[in-house]
Amino acid sequence: MTTTEKHDLLIDGEFIPATSGERFVTLNPATEEPITEVAAADKEDIDRAVESAHEAYPKWRSTAPEERGRLLTALAARIREETDYLAELETRDNGKPISQARSDVEGCARYFEYYAGIADKIHGDSIPLTDKYVDYTVREPLGVTGQIIPWNFPVNLVGRTIAPALAAGNVAVAKPAEQTPLSALKIGEFALEVGIPPGVLNVVPGFGATAGASLAGHPDVNAISFTGSVVTGRQVAKLGADNVTPVHLELGGKSPNVVFPDADLDHALDETITAIFATNAGQVCSAGSRLLVHESIHSEFVDRLATRASELTVGPGLEDPDVGPLVSSDQHRKVREYVEIGREEVGDPIVGGKTPDHDGYFVEPTIFDDVDNSDRIAQEEIFGPVLSVIEFSDEREAFELANDVDYGLVAGIFTSDVGRAHRFAHEMEAGQVYINEWFAGGVETPFGGYKQSGFGREKGLEAIESYTQVKNVCARI
Ligand code: NAD
């Protein structure tokens, strides 16, 4: 495949090289071979992109909402038409199994479709005061919004962060991750093709410390949506604070997957595999990376899990294995370091832990058993196919262990006791709770973190709140 034809920055409807002429290489993580070179934006390019967005804003904001909706629907259709192309591009750039890439492309289209339908339904309230007043609220767009996107779900997160912004009448400057810039550029190209005006969606690949920081700290950016690590999220929040720019942070997780003996254990087993291994090689913010399992089923459940994990296929994403390579050499090194930390903390993993002896950033699905919840492998986000298993003896202990972590993105439970499931939902310090299914929910369901996992909500109607501001109008009559 000819990856993408346009590897330059998309600014004001044109693909142009970076002012500095700098380019970076994006690699195929399954082979470690270069795919292509991409223009690397720096501060000057970000300034140009923000300026072009500002110029496009008045017209886009005053475009009839149903027309904005029509354009976003057309973009969704264009993305769907190119599912095969985009999925292959994503697999080459990110490494993930092709069937998962296809589902991410579908997710991206679905975001544009969903928010297209909301564009003409964004409205305020009327507030009854006394008969001397008429009081109402309107929801207005924020203006120029910046989207800083990580590498784990590149195409999907374009939809998640940009569709609600544009639907609500904002314009966008998106900075994809330097590891995976290609699908975002292609969506930008499709946006132009379907008639979204130049400047409404700018795409500026580049490095975090230059392009990302320039966008987050830009005084003319009116809101930032950041998805990435806690460390970078803190920096982005500080940059935003200097300009009093609202920042919305979607950060990492170390999510508990709690299995009780009264659950459908075959199903819990399948879902546990999906939660940590068979989705993007565990490089998922909402991965079920801590398995809390009741003492009465611990050994049988973990034995079966180890067998299943050892049977998972690991290989290049284009061959559609269960587990693809990790995204980059940095990520590969980091995950292998955690495997060594795990060996020091609890001994050898019961399965996996080895790195296949060939090119590509592969790591075997790895399980550490008898982990203490205070161990680093139970507390820190590894972001790879590595599971820590912790035993509990009763409901109270399980709930306490589940919450005993700095993160609060999601929490999941497997049980047939409805009361227990809802007690769990009530007690969890997490933005989303899964009951008897991992990765439950869809485009319609709000998503975001408690605690160190961030603040603000994406997906669902809540994303429209994140991308609008409320004006109250009070008239004395
Ligand atoms: P990262 O924080 O290193 O990078 C994320 C993005 O920020 C990239 O585009 C990067 O270029 C940019 N960036 C880096 N330094 C920057 C700076 N100083 N200023 C502005 N931008 C900067 O994260 P990552 O390693 O690419 O992604 C993995 C992390 O993302 C994990 O912690 C994962 O849990 C999290 N994540 C969270 C969600 C969610 O919805 N909560 C979704 C996906 C990933």
Image (cartoon, rainbow, N blue to C red):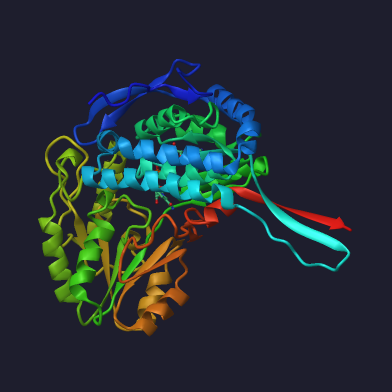
Q: Quadrant of the N terminus?
A: top left
Residue 397 x/y as whole percent: 37, 80
Given residues 48 and 241, the one toward you in this image is: 48
Q: How many marks?
A: 0
Q: Residue at x 22, y 46 (%)?
A: 99
Judged left or right of residue 166, residue 340 is left
Given residues 119 and 66, the one toward you in this image is: 66
Quadrant in the rendering for residue 403:
bottom left
Quadrant in the rendering for residue 238:
top right
Residue 62 x/y as whole percent: 65, 37
Given residues 205 and 159, the one toward you in this image is: 159
Q: Is residue 41 visible?
A: no
Q: Residue at x 18, y 53 (%)?
A: 353
Does 128 appear above or below 365?
A: below
Ligand 1 occupies quarter: top left
Residue 135 x/y as whole percent: 79, 59
Judged left or right of residue 88, residue 137 is right
Judged left or right of residue 443, residue 471 is right
Does 144 appear above or below 448?
A: above
Q: Quadrant of the C terminus?
A: bottom right
Does 261 appear above or below 286?
A: below
Does 48 appear above or below 274?
A: above
Judged left or right of residue 184, residue 239 is right
Residue 268 x/y as whole percent: 23, 70
Q: Residue at x 13, y 54 (%)?
A: 312
Q: Is residue 354 visible?
A: yes
Given residues 7 and 78, the one toward you in this image is: 78
